[in-house]
Amino acid sequence: MRSIARQLRKQPTRSEHILWQAIRKRQLGGLRFLRQHPIGPTIVDFYCHEKRLAVEVDGGIHKNRDVKERDLVRQDLIERYDVRFYRCTAQEVEQNLEKVLEGILEAAG
């Protein structure tokens, strides 16, 4: 899992890069986020250990019905590790980053 996470960190999507630039180095509410972090048998886009919060950025493929169903199963699995979940779309990140950041802060409590 760790090697896969490393590879994913080297190849972020445009929206992941934009969000990472806004939340890295404790820029968002003093929270420390990790990117492409393994949780159980899966990897989340961003993770704040202190708040046990996973953040996922969904691209266009996540509109596909089968992918949506897999996402929900995966989210349920992650939540079983007592991790809260915040999901946004790539479009939201690219067009309304402030709203996404507010949503992450709200989800973090």
Image: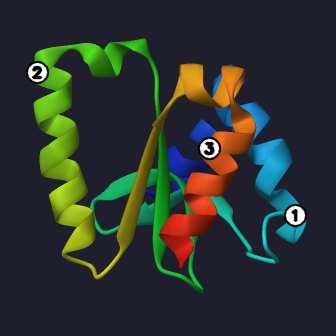
| Mark 2 vs mark 1, CA separation in Å | 35 Å
Q: Which residue bears the numbered disc 1?
A: 27
The kind of residue tagged 3 is: Val
What residue is rendered at 37% in x and 71% in y? Answer: 84
Q: Secondary structure at mark 3?
A: helix
What residue is rendered at 65% in x and 42% in y? Answer: 99
Kindly identify which numbered label has been placed on residue 43: none
Colour mapping used in the image:
rainbow
Q: Considering only vertical position in the picture, is 22 above or below 32?
A: above
The kind of residue tagged 2 is: Asp
Q: Considering only vertical position in the picture, is 52 above or below 73?
A: below
Report the front residue among 4 and 104.
104
Q: Which residue bears the numbered disc 3?
A: 100
The kind of residue tagged 1 is: Gln
Q: Residue furthest bottom?
A: 50
Mark 2 or mark 1: which is in front?
Answer: 1
Q: Is residue 12 something one can see in this rendering?
A: no
The spot of residue 17 in percent (x, y) is 75, 33
Q: Which residue bears the numbered disc 2?
A: 66
